[in-house]
Amino acid sequence: MTTAPLGEPATSLRDPQAIAEGQLDHQRDALLRKLASLSDAERSRSRLPSGWTPLGLLKHLRHVERRWLQWGFLGEQVADPWGDERPGSDAWFVADDETYEVLRARFEEQVERSRAITGAASLDDLAVMGGRFEADPPNLAWILLHLVQEYARHVGHLDIVVELAGGGLGE
């Protein structure tokens, strides 16, 4: 059973925080729909010279949210904030036991945590010093816009992978 795509926030919405959070949810939904359209084999396969896989992308975006919202914005000490990267390189890494189901569940848990963080703050709130940031901390508005652009860029990459795998064009 397929679920209907989560659309962008309504153009009549006037609350900037709700707009930013809605745009981020829209991108998260697009990521999950595109990943669901791929077979298990395609999710683990790299079709690009860089070697990244759709599963690696899913793991990466979970860690991106942890780095920016928990470690960055809240200043929480998180275990292995760069756990999406292969040690000693910038390449994304997926362990043999990290299946689509496992990574999707971890991603969805992170999304719920991220929503709780942003829902309890306002756009003008600054990130706490001492976590990810030692100087010049961004505010929540900057972080949310950064997350939206990061997702949009990577979901665009995934559009290409889905097309190469024989799936439809991006929606």
Image (cartoon, rainbow, N blue to C red):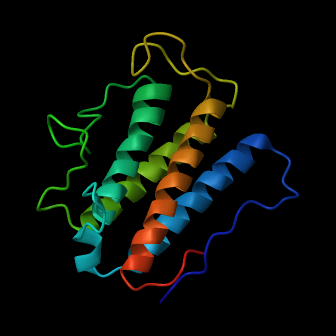
| Residue drawn where x is 54% and y is 43% of the image | 147
Residue 2 point in image, percent of width and height:
51, 85
Q: Does 143 sit left or right of 54 as displayed?
A: right
| Residue drawn where x is 24% and y is 58% of the image | 51
| Residue drawn where x is 34% and y is 63% of the image | 104
Q: Residue furthest front?
A: 49
Q: Does 56 sit left or right of 139 as displayed?
A: left
Q: Residue furthest top?
A: 135
- Quarter placement of the C terminus: bottom right
Residue 87 point in image, percent of width and height:
14, 37
Residue 48 point in image, percent of width and height:
31, 63
Residue 4 point in image, percent of width and height:
60, 80
| Residue drawn where x is 48% and y is 10% of the image | 135
Please tell me whether residue 145 is drawn above or below residue 58 in the rendered image. Answer: above
Q: How many marks?
A: 0
- Say which of 57 and 101 sits in front: 57
Determine if residue 78 is in view.
yes
Determine if residue 32 is in view.
no
- Say which of 96 and 44 sits in front: 44
